[in-house]
């Protein structure tokens, strides 16, 4: 289903209302995939008839959207992980150097056991994603506790992140092969944030 949704998101002719609806649906699916790989622990559940051994998510969760495009995915993730704390990273890519620079950071205290979910709907060069991971590691987050969630990626961007941070878990819907001269994913879907917020 997520690839069906992505095909619709790619369509340049859909309006802002539809793009937002599709983004929310995609967010729920991706949140479910994250839930599947989070560490679990056993618990006993009492049904109306008998007792049954079940499972629950073991650790606390910190969600870190990369501003601003990832704000599109935050609401469905918060509905899925209702008790998650939220941190924010503002990263802006310099159009000449293509180096991501941080302009805002507000991260809650992260315990060693916490699972940290980075949200960024597009991985183009991988610069912003790599910078976000580096910042979290400097705060003491172990690589293996980070789950990076994206909608659409470029092959070079994914390779950059996986090479630099081989222990993180990376979830995305589809990977396009190339970037154009302006470092946009091809064929991609344009700028996710611009299409979601209407700043085209």
Image: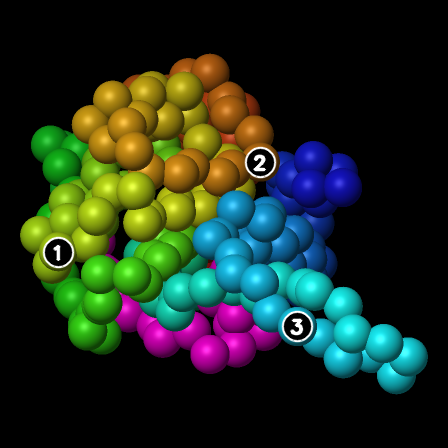
Q: Nearer the viewer, residue 92 or 60?
A: 60
Q: Quadrant of the N terminus?
A: top right
> Residue drawn 88% across and 83% down?
48
Q: Which residue is mark 3?
A: 44
Task: Please say whether residue 91 is one of the residues in the magenta stretch.
Answer: yes
Label 3 element class: strand
Label 2 element class: loop
Task: Please say whether residue 194 is one of the residues in the magenta stretch.
Answer: no
> In the drawing, what numbered circle is on residue 17?
none
Question: Where is residue 24, by image quadrant?
Answer: bottom right
Question: Mark 1 Cα within 10 Å, few/some/many (few <14, many 20+)?
Answer: few
Question: Where is residue 143, by image quadrant?
Answer: top left
Q: Is residue 101 above or below residue 20?
A: above
Q: Which residue is mark 2?
A: 173
> Residue drawn 32% across and 38% down?
168
> Residue drawn 64% across and 44% down?
9
Camera sees residue 68? no
Nearest-to-viewer mark from 3 and 1: 3
Q: Residue furthest right?
A: 49
- Earlier residue among tags 3 and 1: 3
- Earlier residue among tags 2 and 1: 1
Label 1 element class: loop
Q: Which residue is mark 1?
A: 140
How many angstroms separate mark 2 from mark 1 (CA)? Answer: 29 Å
Q: Which residues are magenta?
A: 72-92
**Residue 22: x percent and y percent?**
68, 55
**Residue 169: x percent and y percent?**
40, 38
Q: Nearer the viewer, residue 57 or 134?
A: 57
**Residue 126: x percent and y percent?**
28, 33
**Residue 149: x percent and y percent?**
45, 46
Mark 3 near mark 1, Cβ–Cβ under 8 Å? no
Nearest-to-viewer mark from 2 and 3: 3
């Amino acid at each position: 289903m997520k690839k069906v949704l992505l095909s619709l998101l790619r369509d340049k002719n859909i309006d802002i209302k539809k793009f937002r609806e599709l983004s929310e649906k995609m967010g729920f699916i991706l949140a479910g995939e994250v839930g599947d790989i989070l560490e679990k622990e056993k618990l006993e559940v009492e049904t109306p008839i008998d007792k049954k051994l079940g499972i629950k998510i073991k650790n606390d969760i910190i969600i870190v959207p990369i501003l601003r495009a990832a704000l599109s995915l935050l609401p469905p993730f918060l509905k899925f992980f209702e008790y998650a704390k939220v941190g924010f990273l503002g990263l802006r890519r310099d159009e000449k150097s293509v180096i991501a620079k941080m302009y805002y950071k507000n991260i809650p205290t992260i315990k060693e056991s916490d699972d940290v979910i980075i949200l960024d709907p597009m991985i183009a060069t991988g610069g912003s994603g790599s910078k976000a991971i580096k910042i979290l590691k400097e705060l003491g987050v172990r690589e293996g506790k980070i789950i990076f969630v994206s909608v659409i990626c470029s092959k070079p961007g994914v390779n950059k992140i996986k090479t630099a941070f081989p222990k993180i878990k990376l979830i995305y819907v589809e990977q396009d092969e190339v970037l154009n001269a302006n470092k946009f994913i091809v064929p991609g879907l344009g700028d996710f944030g611009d299409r979601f917020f209407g700043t085209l």
